[in-house]
Image (cartoon, grey):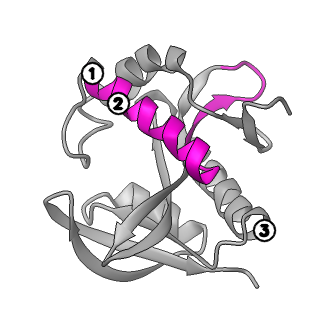
């Protein structure tokens, strides 16, 4: 693995976000109303740049962030998946986040990438617990969380709306 690659699965390479990813993130994720249905709305190009910068800061500060998910064989952009620190009731919790381009939905990429992040968080980083913060209406994301062994914990108010918290404790 090169320095930018964080994780590799059977089909996916997860690598650190770079400035060059802004156009792809904007075009295939943040400007697609279907992809952003359960998010706080579409992102413009400035917000996309801020998103990449935020992830780069997380990578430097925490050693984790949302990473670009690419097809391991072809290099095609699939989406983003990774681990980011989130505040839940005044505690920092490591969240597994995932968002994939619409044309790649239904292929199991989110589950495969999220499972790799969970394994990395528990086995390599020794996180005691990880969470997924999901809009309660996003049934597909809930299924991904459940398939990687997360369970509903509670509903909180975050990002000006109710958010379901799914959690899993460390394997140990």
**Dot 3: within a 10 Å radius of its alpha carbon, few (fewer than 14), some, or many (20 or more) residues?**
some
Relative vertical location of residue 143 with respect to residue 27 in this rendering, above or below: below
Report the span colored magenta: 46-75
Residue shown at the point (76%, 85%) measured from the top left:
172
Q: x, y (%) of residue 74? A: 73, 18
Q: Is residue 53 magenta?
A: yes
**Does the image show residue 123?**
yes
**Does the image show residue 101?**
no
* Residue highlighted by disc 3: 123
Distance between the Cα atoms at labels 1 and 3?
A: 36 Å
- Give the mark toward the camera: 2 or 3: 2
**Dot 1: within a 10 Å radius of its alpha carbon, few (fewer than 14), some, or many (20 or more) residues?**
few
Relative vertical location of residue 93 with respect to residue 144 in this rendering, above or below: below
Residue 10 versus residue 106: which sits nearer the camera?
10
Q: Are marks 2 and 3 in contact (CB under 8 Å)?
A: no
Residue 50, label in figure:
2
């Amino acid at each position: 693995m090169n320095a930018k690659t964080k994780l590799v699965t059977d089909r996916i390479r997860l690598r650190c976000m770079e400035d060059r990813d802004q156009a792809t993130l904007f075009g295939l994720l943040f400007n697609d109303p279907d992809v952003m249905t359960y998010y706080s709305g579409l992102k413009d190009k400035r917000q996309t740049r801020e998103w990449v910068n935020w992830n780069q800061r997380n990578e430097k500060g925490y050693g984790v962030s949302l990473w670009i998910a690419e097809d391991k064989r072809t290099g095609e952009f699939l989406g983003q998946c990774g681990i980011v620190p989130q505040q839940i009731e005044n505690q920092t919790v490591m969240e597994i986040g995932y968002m994939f381009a619409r044309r790649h939905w239904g292929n199991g990429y989110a589950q495969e990438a999220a499972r790799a992040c969970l394994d990395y968080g528990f086995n390599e980083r020794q996180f005691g617990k990880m969470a997924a913060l999901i809009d309660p209406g996003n049934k597909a994301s809930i299924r991904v969380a459940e398939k990687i062994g997360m369970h509903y914990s509670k509903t909180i108010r975050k990002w000006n709306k109710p958010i379901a918290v799914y959690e899993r404790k460390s394997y140990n």
